[in-house]
Image (tube, rainbow, N blue to C red):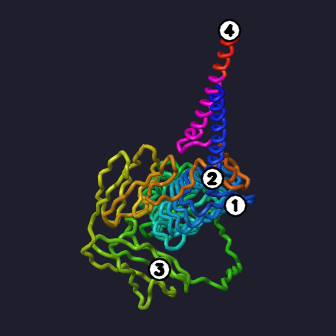
């Protein structure tokens, strides 16, 4: 009996010691996981160099974060990563960043943003709801995007993607822009927009949820999807598609003039005529007039993002011209730009009007079309290969599924593939990347760390982990109870059982002895 009692107490003591050890180790592991970043007392978010991916909703709704500078290790910012961080006013993105997810910075307080040259994909609504955002700037050398007058375009400048919500007053549409993208002016405060003759397409939803009430449309055959409910007046040429749209949608239409030459059949009167001439008009002197020249880029049968139109830029005297993206042409290799003025290159100081024409060299290695293969990388689906014309866009085959993983996106050569911006110029395989739901890491073969959504915690005050809500109970990656703690509980119960058995045996022995 004494032996069994001692065994019981030993088991109980052992279970207590082991439980304390498991809890201590579990707390240490939890702290290690949660030191990927910290928020200091001034609201600066410091993300450590070990982090390569900021998962979706990682910091969503945090009001203690006011500014952050990304470390050079960050490659991906997930969907809604900083959504609703209304006090976040300054973000510096790192060179090396490749992907900005949908609504990544939605409804934040940032005033301006610079997109690094390495970014190849910006998700839908990434900067929507940012009412203080007045300017988006794209670093030189970016292969997917460019900026002009604070707005975001594709690399060729032919598609207007987004005008910042906080940009007021007016906007100058980039020379050579052919398409106003869906949602381009969503949430914007600009009230009047002039679309030059280069704009041939206005996509449906381009002006939805905007304050634009007046639009000037100079292209007589522009394709107009929808102008939104805020537009009340359209200026354009008689007989144009703009006039037809205005009539069909009961919008006031004002004729600009005769696009076909000759007298304007419907001249627009001066809205504020002044029949009394100034008896002594004094011209407004211009002591320092600015001289500008037109620089034209002729594609000579090539195309940029499907457009074959010449691209024109207006350059101040002595300035340097913007150079469009390299064009493509079936069966040829682009060999640079040739000028119609001796000695001029695209890097020359512009001192007169000049035309640069694309030079082409016949290629026997180029093909008219290429094959795009989709590797689901463990996913359940199978997607047929696509045959895509040279310089055209592949079609997104869909979103594959995989048990225990979340689909990150389609990648080529380690870079996220944007089906709306990247064109096909060779046979290629697009590979599905996956995030392990248990570990939070991306299955790209690097084993790199990611900053998971489950680590966002509450509104921190600046300690390591930024005020995480730390779970003191050790668990597995799937959230189950740590088996080591379960073993301790089993040992404890065994010890209690032995003590109870020993006690009952002793009581039975005493009872039997008293009967004698």
Q: Is residue 260 found inside the magenta-colored segment of the image? A: no
Which quadrant: the N terminus? top right
Q: Residue at x 59, y 47 (%)?
A: 454
Q: Are marks 2 and 1 in contact (CB under 8 Å)?
A: no
Query: Nearer the observer, disc 2 or disc 4?
Result: 4
Query: Nearer the observer, disc 4 or disc 3?
Result: 4
Disc 4 marks which residue?
Answer: 516
Query: Nearer the observer, disc 2 or disc 1?
Result: 2
What SS does tag 4 mark?
loop
Disc 1 marks which residue?
Answer: 44
Query: Nearer the observer, disc 1 or disc 4?
Result: 4
Q: CA distance from mark 3 to mark 2?
A: 55 Å
Q: CA distance from mark 2 to mark 1?
A: 17 Å
Among numbered discs 4 and 3, the one appearing first in the sequence? 3
Disc 3 marks which residue?
Answer: 295
Which quadrant: the C terminus? top right
């Amino acid at each position: 009996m004494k032996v069994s009692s001692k065994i019981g107490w030993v088991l109980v003591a052992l279970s207590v010691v082991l439980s304390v050890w498991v809890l201590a180790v579990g707390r240490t592991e939890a702290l290690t996981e949660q030191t990927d970043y910290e928020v200091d007392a001034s609201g600066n978010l410091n993300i450590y160099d070990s982090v390569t991916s900021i998962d979706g909703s990682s910091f969503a709704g945090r009001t203690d974060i006011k500014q952050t500078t990304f470390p050079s290790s960050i490659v991906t910012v997930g969907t809604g990563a900083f959504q609703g961080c209304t006090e976040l006013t300054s973000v510096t993105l790192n060179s090396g960043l490749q992907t900005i997810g949908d609504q990544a910075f939605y409804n934040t307080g940032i005033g301006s943003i610079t997109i690094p040259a390495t970014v190849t994909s910006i998700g839908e609504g990434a900067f929507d709801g940012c009412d203080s955002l007045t300017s988006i700037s794209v670093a030189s050398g970016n292969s997917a995007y460019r900026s002009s007058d604070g707005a975001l375009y594709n690399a060729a400048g032919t598609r207007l993607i987004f005008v910042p919500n906080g940009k007021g007053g007016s906007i100058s549409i980039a020379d050579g822009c052919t398409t106003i993208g869906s949602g381009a002016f969503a949430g914007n405060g600009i009230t009047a927009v002039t679309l030059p003759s280069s704009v041939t397409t206005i996509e449906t939803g381009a002006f939805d949820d905007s304050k634009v009430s007046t639009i000037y449309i100079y292209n007589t055959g522009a394709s107009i999807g929808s102008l939104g409910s805020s537009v009340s007046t359209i200026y354009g040429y008689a007989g144009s598609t703009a006039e037809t749209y205005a009539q069909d949608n009961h919008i006031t239409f004002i004729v600009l003039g005769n696009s076909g030459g000759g007298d304007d059949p419907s001249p627009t009167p001066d809205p504020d005529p002044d029949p009394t001439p100034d008896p002594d008009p004094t011209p407004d002197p211009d002591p320092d007039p600015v001289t500008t020249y037109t620089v034209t880029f002729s594609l000579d049968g090539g195309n940029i993002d499907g457009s074959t139109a010449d691209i024109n830029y207006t350059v101040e005297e002595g300035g340097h011209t913007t150079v469009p993206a390299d064009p493509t042409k079936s069966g040829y290799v682009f060999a640079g730009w040739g000028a119609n003025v001796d000695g001029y290159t695209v890097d020359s100081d512009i001192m007169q009007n000049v035309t640069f024409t694309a030079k082409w060299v016949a290629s026997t290695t180029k093909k008219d079309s290429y094959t795009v293969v989709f590797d689901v990388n463990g996913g359940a689906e199978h997607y047929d290969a696509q045959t895509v014309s040279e310089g055209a866009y592949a079609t997104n085959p869909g979103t594959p599924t995989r048990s225990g993983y979340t689909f990150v996106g389609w990648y080529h050569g380690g870079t996220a593939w944007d089906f709306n911006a990247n064109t096909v110029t060779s046979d290629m395989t697009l590979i599905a990347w996956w995030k392990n739901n248990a570990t939070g890491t991306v299955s790209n073969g690097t084993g790199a760390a990611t900053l998971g959504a489950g680590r966002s915690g509450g509104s921190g005050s600046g300690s390591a982990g930024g005020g995480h809500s730390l779970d003191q109970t050790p668990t597995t990656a799937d959230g189950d109870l740590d088996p080591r703690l379960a073993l301790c509980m089993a040992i404890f119960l065994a010890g209690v059982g032995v003590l109870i058995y020993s006690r009952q045996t002793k009581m039975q022995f005493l009872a039997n002895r008293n009967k004698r």
